[in-house]
Image: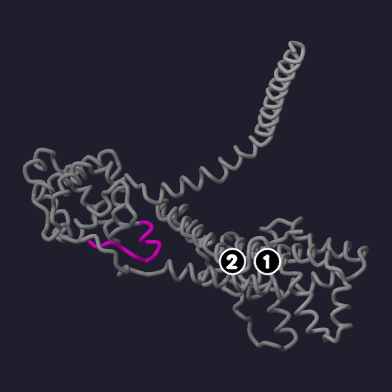
Amino acid sequence: MSAMRTTILNSEALTRDEAKSARREVQRHKRTAFFLVAPLLVFITLSFVVPIGTMLYRGVHNPAVAELIPETLELLEDWDGKQVPSSRVMTSLALDLQRLAKIRRSGKLAEEINRARPGMSSIIKSSARKMKKTPQDELVNSGAAHLLNAHKAWADVKIWRAIKSVGGVYSARNYLKSLDLERNFDGEIQVRKATKIYLQLYGKTLKIALYITLLCLILGYPLAYFLANIPSKLSNLLMIFVLLPFWTSLLVRTTAWIALLQTNGVINSFFMGIGLTTEPLDMLYTRFATIIAMTHILLPFMILPLYSVMKGIDASYMRAAMSMGARPMRAFFTVYLPNTLPGLSAGALLVFIISVGYYITPALVGGTDGQMISNIIAFHMQQSNNWGLAAALGTLLLAVILTLYWVYDRLVGSNNIKLG
């Protein structure tokens, strides 16, 4: 009896040791897997998560005005906005303009307020120069009078409303502006009275991306079908020409289209040489140039998924359908086409999403008519220095892409996507 008990205890101890050993082994495998995946996680965090998070934050965070004129904004908190502020508020702004002019920061204030009310840049800069020349004692005693003498626009209540509206550290005004909306002084959201361009740009961007996707589909589907149904030796040779654009610089390919489409370019010279036209056609710096150049660049992204899927379709499917009485076209649409849907979905999604965010090609060949939303985002980042608006436009572009992907997933299903 004791021997049996000892055996049972030993077996239980062995089982516990085996369980501990198994847990340690599992933990060791998890640590190994984590260290193997850690570089990828760091890369994704630094390349995607941090930039997108920064973009979202910059869209609502703009403390520039609050840091430049904090005392004036504090006095404006209790202002009702119906009449011009009191002389105390004007005096405070006059002193702030004098201080900013001395440290050469009045231009930054002018830039920020000018975004809320165009035309304010010159008013603030000229007033700051005059306040700089005025003794500080005079500004303390009669700053309001000096401010009104510097420019009569300071008697306009709308200017003070603009100053108060941009004084918040956190604000949704960039997102509202990117949707061609604005918030009035009472806090109500309304359509912007100024130029409305951003919604039109979003619509034009989506339309151009759709045209490019359809052109790539029309051109890529027959070519992928041809490559998938010829002998492998020949298809592999021809596939080199499909992959050839990937071996050439994007800038070189875009510049080549400039040489082809310009007024005295190859295409116009050929048309005029054969008598098809009597004068050069305006093809460069148009929406047409953007669509043609981007279709050429993105066509391989449509062909490769289609080819990889078509290569795996058994040719006997079509023969079986036709042997049962179906005509070739009906057999194609009812048997072959549904089997290519995974590659078709992947190619269309790749081309559409890439074209929506394209920047270089529209910037070089598109001109004013062929510009897309990405070019406006780059303009606000590089030239107007309005990073908040650029971040808001980028965030909304990301939201549009995610929404379209969600709709696509609901209608087609992401499980039908197949890259090969």
- Magenta stretch bounds: 174-185
Q: Residue at x 83, y 85 (%)?
A: 326
Q: Residue furthest left?
A: 141
Sequence-first tag of 2 and 1: 1
419 versus 206 height, above or below: above
Counting from the top left corner in percent of width and height, residue 109 is at 29, 48
Q: Nearer the viewer, residue 248 or 222?
A: 222
Counting from the top left corner in percent of width and height, residue 276 is at 70, 88
Q: Which mark is residue 345?
A: 1
Residue, disc 2 = 408
The 10 Å Cα crowd at callout 2, few under 14, some 14 to 19, many 20 or more, is: some
Q: Residue at x 56, y 46 (%)?
A: 48
47 versus 320 height, above or below: above
* Separation of marks 2 and 1 at Cα, in angstroms: 9 Å
Under tag 1, what secondary structure? helix
Residue type at tag 1: Ser
